[in-house]
Image (spheres, helix red, strand yellow):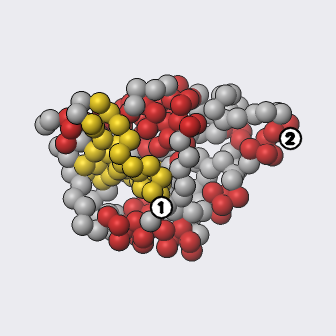
């Protein structure tokens, strides 16, 4: 396959109570809100005429439910690699709550206590990209904000920490592709 045929469609799950509050959510398996389900339906309408060589989803219910409501549940593969960054002891807490204890704290600058180092998340992103390269067309990835931001950075050849530069809203669609042989962002943070 000529590599320019590959396009990655990054789909962030719909809203949850914790995404609404800004709480860090990795392994806590919380459902979509009513608005999150509406976002998933809008994603489905946006993608209804798209053909994907492969659809993959994080095993967390917020991603799986977004995928199912969007109409891709029957063909989606569950991928542990698409899980969100493991925030360890900071799970369920907002940045402002954490900064009460650790002034100036950012998930991008410190390994979360008991959590996953940024470099490990970057390696997972590389593995996802490698598995998509052989898919023979467009690939839809239903996943989470920090993981997809890191994947975009890795796609562009930037260090994983550069994911901090890419804002990503719930229920958004972004696309990564090629301009000639260069990896590029085609669209970013498009909310349907």
Q: In this picture, is 136 found above or below 125? A: below
Tell me if residue 120 can be seen. no
Where residue 126 sits in the image (x, y, percent)? Answer: 39, 30
Q: Check the picture and name the quadrant holding the C terminus.
A: bottom left
Q: Position of residue 117 (x, y in %)?
A: 58, 28
Give the camera-side residue of 148 and 173: 173
Q: Quarter of the image holding residue 99?
A: top right
Residues packed near mark 2 inside 10 Å, few (<14), some (14 to 19) or many (20 plus) = few
Q: Which residue sits at x=24%, y=66%?
A: 49
Residue lying at the far right of the rendered structure = 100
Residue at the farthest left position: 1
The answer to whether 191 appears left or right of 86 in the picture is: left
Furthest toward the front, the residue is 179
- Spot occupied by residue 141 in the image (x, y as percentages of width and height): 37, 50
Give the CA separation, mark 2 to mark 1. Answer: 32 Å
Question: In the figure, is residue 142 to the left or right of 61?
Answer: left
In front here: 59 or 37?
A: 37
173 lies above or below 4: below
Instruction: Give the label on residue 2, or none.
Output: none
The residue closer to the viewer here, 90 or 4, is 4
Element under label 2? Answer: helix
Q: Does residue 66 show up? A: yes
Residues at discs 2 and 1 in contact (Cβ within 8 Å)? no
Q: Residues within 10 Å of mark 1 (few under 14, many from 20)?
A: some
Question: What's the mark number on residue 191?
Answer: 1
The N terminus - image quarter = top left
Q: Secondary structure at mark 1?
A: strand
Residue tagged 2:
100
């Amino acid at each position: 396959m000529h590599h320019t045929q590959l396009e990655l469609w990054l789909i962030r799950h719909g809203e949850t109570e914790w995404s609404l509050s800004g709480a860090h959510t990795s392994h806590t398996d919380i459902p979509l809100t009513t608005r999150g389900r509406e976002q998933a339906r809008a994603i489905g309408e946006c993608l209804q005429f798209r053909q994907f060589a492969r659809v993959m989803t994080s095993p967390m219910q917020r991603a799986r439910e977004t995928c199912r409501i969007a109409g891709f549940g029957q063909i989606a593969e569950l991928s542990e690699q698409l899980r969100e960054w493991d925030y360890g002891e900071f799970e369920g807490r907002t940045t402002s709550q954490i900064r009460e204890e650790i002034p100036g704290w950012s998930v991008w600058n410190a390994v979360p206590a008991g959590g996953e180092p940024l470099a490990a998340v970057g390696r997972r992103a590389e593995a996802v990209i490698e598995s998509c390269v052989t898919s023979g067309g467009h690939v839809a990835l239903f996943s989470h904000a920090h993981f997809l931001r890191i994947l975009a950075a890795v796609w562009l050849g930037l260090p994983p920490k550069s994911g901090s530069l890419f804002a990503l809203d719930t229920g958004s669609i972004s696309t990564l592709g090629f301009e000639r042989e260069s990896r590029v962002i085609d669209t970013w943070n498009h909310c349907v």
